[in-house]
């Protein structure tokens, strides 16, 4: 399990209802079901940790190890 938290860079406040997508590296992993951030800017995923890419609203924002809590500023 891991959580992606999205923060508005200009205000420092959580970004509400942003679509978060995750695509894992490797043929066998595939992608996680898209989630939307809650009022705390958090999107929770039940998939195992791993290496991959995070997308917010369809734009690539991070590539690397995804585990625990990943904070993304947009």
Image (tube, rainbow, N blue to C red):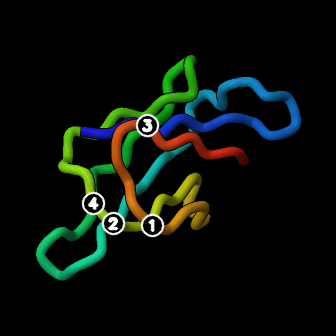
**Dot 3 corresponds to which residue?**
69
Q: Quadrant of residue 58?
A: bottom right
Q: Quadrant of residue 71?
A: top right
Q: Is residue 63 above or below residue 38?
A: below
Q: Earlier in the sequence, mark 3 or mark 2?
A: 2
Out of 67 and 16, give the one closest to the viewer: 67
**Distance between the Cα atoms at labels 2 and 1?**
5 Å
Q: Which mark is residue 50?
A: 4
CB under 8 Å between callouts 2 and 1?
A: yes
CB under 8 Å between callouts 4 and 3?
A: no
Position of 32 with respect to 16 (left or right) is left
Q: Quadrant of residue 1?
A: top left
Q: Residue furthest right?
A: 10
Position of 71 with respect to 34 (left or right) is right
Check disc 4 and report its element: helix, strand or loop.
strand
Out of 67 and 27, give the one closest to the viewer: 67
Check disc 1 and report its element: helix, strand or loop.
strand
**Dot 1 corresponds to which residue?**
64
CB under 8 Å between callouts 3 and 2?
A: no
**Dot 2 corresponds to which residue?**
51
């Amino acid at each position: 399990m891991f959580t992606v938290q999205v923060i508005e860079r200009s205000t420092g406040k959580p970004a509400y209802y942003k679509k978060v997508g995750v695509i894992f590296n490797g043929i066998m992993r595939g992608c996680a079901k898209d989630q939307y951030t809650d009022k705390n800017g958090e999107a929770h995923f039940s998939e195992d940790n791993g290496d991959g890419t995070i997308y917010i609203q369809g734009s690539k924002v991070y590539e690397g190890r995804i585990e625990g809590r990943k904070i993304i500023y947009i």
